[in-house]
Amino acid sequence: MKNYIVLFVMLFAFASCKNEAQNSVVSVSERQILVNGSPYLIKGICYHPVPKGSDKRDFSALAQDLALMVEAGINTIRVYAPIDNKAVLDDIHAAGIKVIIGFGYNQKGKFDILSGTYIDYVNKYKNHPSILMWELGNEYNYHPEWFRGDIKNWYKAMNDAAELIHKNDSNHPVTTAHGELPDALALSMGPNIDVWGMNVYRWDDPSSIFFQWEAVSEKPMYLSEAGGDSYMTISKAGFEEGINEKAQAEANKNILDKIFENQEVCSGVTMFSFTDGWWKAGNPDKQDIGGWAPNSSGVPYDGAPNEEFWGIVDIDRNKKETFSVVKNKYNQLKH
């Protein structure tokens, strides 16, 4: 058995080195994302691993996480802050997974948009084969107060950042994670955005957004967040109050069905999220009920975002019922 493992590792390493020499070219054509000229469907997950008792991201469980992701058929992870560690990116690439790298606006000068240091990261890692897209901001349209009370200040910064990325890297598209459907102002001020990501919580059926997007833009889009949590604040829709993995599994099944029925418009999804986050709503040493998110009344099935219960695995990496749902849906797709 040991010999088989060694052989597998050697073959995997050989394939990885070969792929390293063939850096991916990611582009867009009409409503599609292409990787080396072939359509790419995002079968993804949002990934922000924070251990118990901490509020800091930590990749110490990366090997275990990647094994679970591969089992689930995940081909893309979306991170909310840059990964400035080549070894981590190398491991992600070796697992056959690509990354959407997110840049914040004000991260105290650490690869952020305000200081302009995001472009240093782009130039440092633009040739790494794990990169799928560069992402600017996460639901900033809900927070004009971060931009001197005028959201136009954000849209200008976003568009200017996308332009500079294009000048430095012609091989990867620029996206943004917009809260819900972008309005006319966002679209008019963001012509340099290649792919529009949207964080969408419309109960267990996001299909209406695809028709709405088709009516306002010819660019590619994907759902940068979607899904349900595994805690019911109230009993509703046939699901009992309390920890309820069945509610989460049912919601995610219905959501994924609708997404993949609309591939002519939607380029996939990064489901929220891989692991429960105990740091989000209270004491990071325990799992708390509650939490708040903008425009979250559409969270299935109770309209309440219990922010610490959103993983497809729990914080100890035990699979929830929804893990099987995601695995079945992702693995049956060809892309």
Image (cartoon, helix red, strand yellow):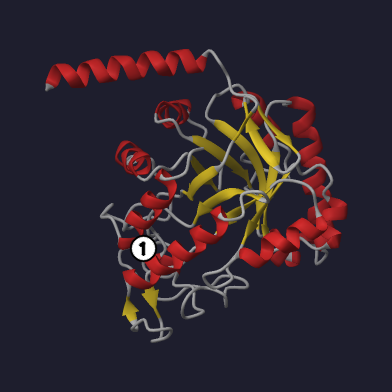
Q: Which residue is mark 1?
A: 284
Snapshot quadrant of residue 139: bottom right
* Mark 1 Cα-neighbour bin, 10 Å: few <14, some 14–19, many ≥20: some
Q: Position of residue 305 (x, y in %)?
A: 49, 73
The answer to whether residue 271 is seen in the rendering is yes
**Which residue is situated farthest in the left direction here?**
1
* On screen, residue 189 above or below 172: below
Q: Secondary structure at mark 1?
A: loop
In the figure, is residue 284 to the left or right of 210? left
- The amino acid sitting under disc 1 is Pro
Question: In this rendering, is residue 33 above or below 246?
Answer: above
Q: Residue at x 37, y 59 (%)?
A: 276
In the depicted structure, whether residue 207 falls above or below residue 98: below
Relative depth, front residue between 262 and 137: 262
The residue at the far bottom in this view is 235
In this rendering, would 277 be left or right of 116? left
Residue lying at 81% horizontally and 45% vertically, measured from the top left? 159
Q: Residue at x 59, y 34 (%)?
A: 132
Residue 307 percent across, percent down from the top left: 45, 68
Measuring from the top left, give residue 265's x and y in whole percent. 68, 51
Between residue 122 and residue 35, name the one nearer to us.
35
Q: Quadrant of the N terminus?
A: top left
Residue 91 position, x and y percent, is 40, 29
Please state which of residues 286 and 334 is positioned toward the viewer in this rendering: 334
- Mark yes or no: residue 288 visible: no
Query: Is 46 left, or right, of 118 in this rendering?
Result: left
Q: Residue at x 53, y 37 (%)?
A: 99
Q: How many numbered dots are placed on residues in this image?
A: 1
